[in-house]
Image (cartoon, rainbow, N blue to C red):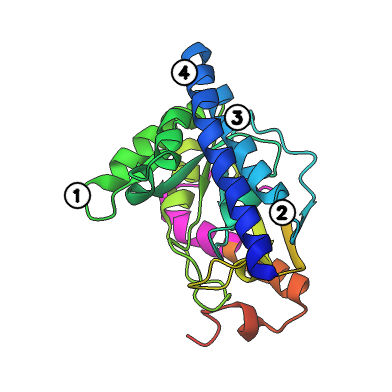
Amino acid sequence: MQQIKSLFIWSAILLLIIGWLPLLAIVRLVDRDETRYRTGYLFRRLGKLISKVNPFWKVTLIDYETVDDRHPYVMVSNHLSNADIPVVSNLPWEMKWVAKRELFQLPVVGWMMKLAGDIPVDRKAAGQKLTTFRKAIFYLRNRTSVMFFPEGTRSRDGRMNRFNRGAFELAIREQVPVLPMVIDGTRGCLPKNSWIFRENVDVRLVVLDPVPTEGMDLEQAAELTELVRERMVFKLMELREKERQDVDAMAAV
């Protein structure tokens, strides 16, 4: 029975993705905003719908109501599974996602990422950080937030990994606040190497207070990185009611 239900959910997701492409292309044609704000916003709504068609997912958003996405942030979140993206898309904001280049090469979804103006990263290319920064800076200076997974990849065991400094260096360069978010529950949405959705998955997304960067210089990037990560670790401990070593992969290092 669970296999049949999962098959119907995947069919609905596939139909949504296929149907969304021409709609997104039309909006892109009339979107005169340099940042493709409306196009990107519509693309995030697809992610929200994907999470809604799955009756097994209960997504709860916490403390997001006061955020104005046109007051730009460098947004950061922990990363547990592929389900993180549609879950974050439940937030009523537009943010340009910084994502690995391979995703942009996927049929349909990759095309929509390009239409939305998301930022590809080729980790093997020389000077890629500078290229990514240039695109991200353009968005921030035009009142559009940018989204990072600072761990760089999904957590293997659900604990929070070390953070890369790139997002925090960007925030300091542009003197914009960092907006931390903590996700819990998505690791159970879809078991690894399986297409069958688990039942009764409770997902929570908590938006923490923004961390200002005014007056900071690049020498403080490591300090900012650890400050934000520390706040996120404590929130994850609170959500899971676990000790630090159970949520922080760096606790024993």
Q: Secondary structure at mark 3?
A: helix
The answer for how far apart the CA atoms under marks 4 and 2 are is 29 Å
- Residue at 28% x, 49% y is 122
- Residue 52 falls inside the magenta stretch: no
The answer for how far apart the CA atoms under marks 4 and 3 are is 15 Å
- Residue at 58% x, 54% y is 10
Disc 3 residue type (three-letter): Leu
Tell me: residue 236, above or below residue 104: below
Disc 1 residue type (three-letter): Ala
Q: Secondary structure at mark 1?
A: loop
Q: Which residue is mark 2?
A: 208
Q: Which label sits on residue 34?
A: 4
- Residue 211 falls inside the magenta stretch: yes
Which quadrant holds the N terminus? bottom right
Q: Which residue is mark 3?
A: 42
The answer for how far apart the CA atoms under marks 1 and 4 are is 27 Å
- In the depicted view, which residue is nearer to us: 132 or 176? 132
Disc 2 residue type (three-letter): Leu
Q: Which label sits on residue 137?
A: none
- In the depicted view, which residue is nearer to us: 193 or 42? 193
